[in-house]
Image (tube, coloured by chain):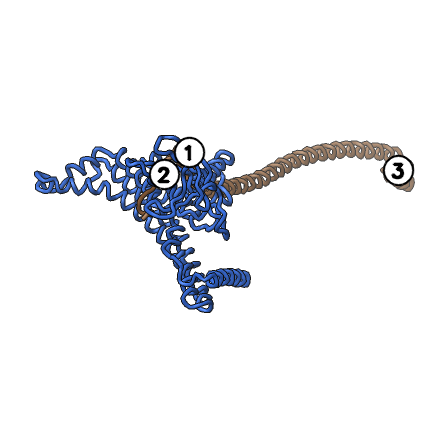
Amino acid sequence: MELFTPEFGLVFWMFVVFALLFFILAKYAWPFIVKSLEERADLIDKGVLYAQNAKEQLDNAKAEAEKYIAEAQMKQAEILREAAKMKSQIIEDAKSSASVEAKKVMDAAKLAIEQARKESELQFRNEVSAFALSIAEKMVRKNMAGDKAQTELVDKLLNEVEIKN
Amino acid sequence: MKKILTILLAVVLSAVTINASATDNGGEQGKIDTKAIIFEHLGDRYGWEVPFCHSLSIPLPIIVRDYEGGWHIFSSSRLAHEAEYDGFSIAAEGANHGKVVGMRPDASGAMVEYRPFDISITKNVAALIICAIVVMLCVFSVKRWYTNHGMKAPRKWTAAIELVVEFVYMGVIRPTLGAKAPKFAPYLLTVFFFILTMNLLGLVVIFPGGANLTGNIAVTMVLAIFTFLITNLFGSKHYWKDIFWPEVPIWLKFPIPIMPMIEVFGIFTKPAALMVRLFANMMGGHMIVIVLTLLIFIFAALGGIAVGAGTTVVSVAFSLFMLLLDTLVSFIQAFVFTMLSTLFISLAQAPAEHE
């Protein structure tokens, strides 16, 4: 039976062909392919790991950003509050200083008015006394000429005073 | 799709039936030599037959050395149709049936037939070379992809090859051999792809395929010898110790070395099992398909065209099923051969502290 007894020619060629094929592939192809396969598997593993890390970091970053935003908002509110306080303080201060100033001015004005009034009073008294003196002088002078004349004189003098005033 | 299949089937069936009836009318009733046909298809031959044409074949070189030591190289077409060339012809019968034989004088001076030293490029050898080229093209396409595209995932055919490489390497070789995987992977992957290609090309009926390679014991023998050599040449100290001085009760190895004998026997049975498993599986597959096809002619010869036609339907259906099964078997057998080779090699690599 030919099938069960190996033919030498075929064995020989099989040996040659297989050895050649093995030599060529083992030298030029398989090590490279196997290495590349392993490398790519590693690369994919690393990629997955990297992506996971990146996602984690992204999540962390988001949380951190939110934290910063909340902090900033808090600070902003505080600053605003302080500013409002400061504003009212400044207004208060201004008001009080203004009232003090106004009071000072008023006092000075009162003083001046008082002085002017006193002066004018003094002047008026002087003038009244001068008039009274002159009236008395003229009355004394007219006394000599009768009652009628005296009375007329007094009237006349009084009229003069009235006109003068 | 179904329609196309039905039409195709009808065409095939009618062709086969006509063929059967032609044989029938040719007056060769009941003269179908099934054994001869089966072995003709399973065996090797000079020249590669052209489909649908028995008289024509693709010529291949015949390389023989005669009894005087002279080399003769000529085309197989010169020996076609029982012709003689350069003193050589193809034996029609006898022990050398189908082989190139020459004539030489024996001691008494009479001419006797002898078998020259024959390393012809036969159909099987040509198929081997084609398979080797196909394997190289496939493997180098993957390599080229890696050189040109780096770490990108391959596409189409390259991806299919790469998938198989990864299936075998990551699935069998690396888990079994561990750190030593890169050292033995080239051999195991070459074996796998070569067997797979030979198996699958063997299932293709016309020219580039059709050679029953892995169903030929010469081919599986060489493969098994390679595994045997690699297993034993790279065997660790512990492996050899386990063979000649295994850890069994002393009376099992001294004074009569029963266990060592069994172990030494095992060294040879392992590759022998590899050889026979692949050979028997593939030859069986081919044989079943041929027999199923032959059934058509046998029944046609026995019971006429009607019976032949009826058998045709059944036979073609079964052949189709068997061929599909063979496609699966092609892959499984290549895988099993590789897996067992890996296992044998890894067993011989076992370090001392592994036990």
Tell me which amino acid carries mark 2: Met
**In the rendered structure, are the residues bearing label 3 and label 2 in contact, judged by CB atoms less than 8 Å apart?**
no
* Quarter placement of the C terminus of chain B: top left
Chain letter, colour brown: A
On the image, the x and y values in percent for residue B166 come to 40, 43
Q: Nearer the viewer, mark 1 or mark 2?
A: 2
Residue B17's x, y, as percent? 49, 63
What residue would you read off at disc 1?
B72
Q: Colour of chain B?
A: blue
Residue occupied by mark 2: B103
Total number of numbered labels? 3
Tag 3, which chain? A
Left or right, A143 with respect to B295, comes to right
- Specify the subunit that label 1 lies on: B
How far across and down, in percent of the image, does residue B323 sit?
42, 55
Pointer 3 residue = A160
Q: Is B117 or B255 nearer to us in this picture? A: B117
Q: Which amino acid, mark 1?
A: His
Element at label 1: strand
Say which quarter of the image contains residue A46.
top left
Query: Which quarter of the figure has residue A8?
Result: top left
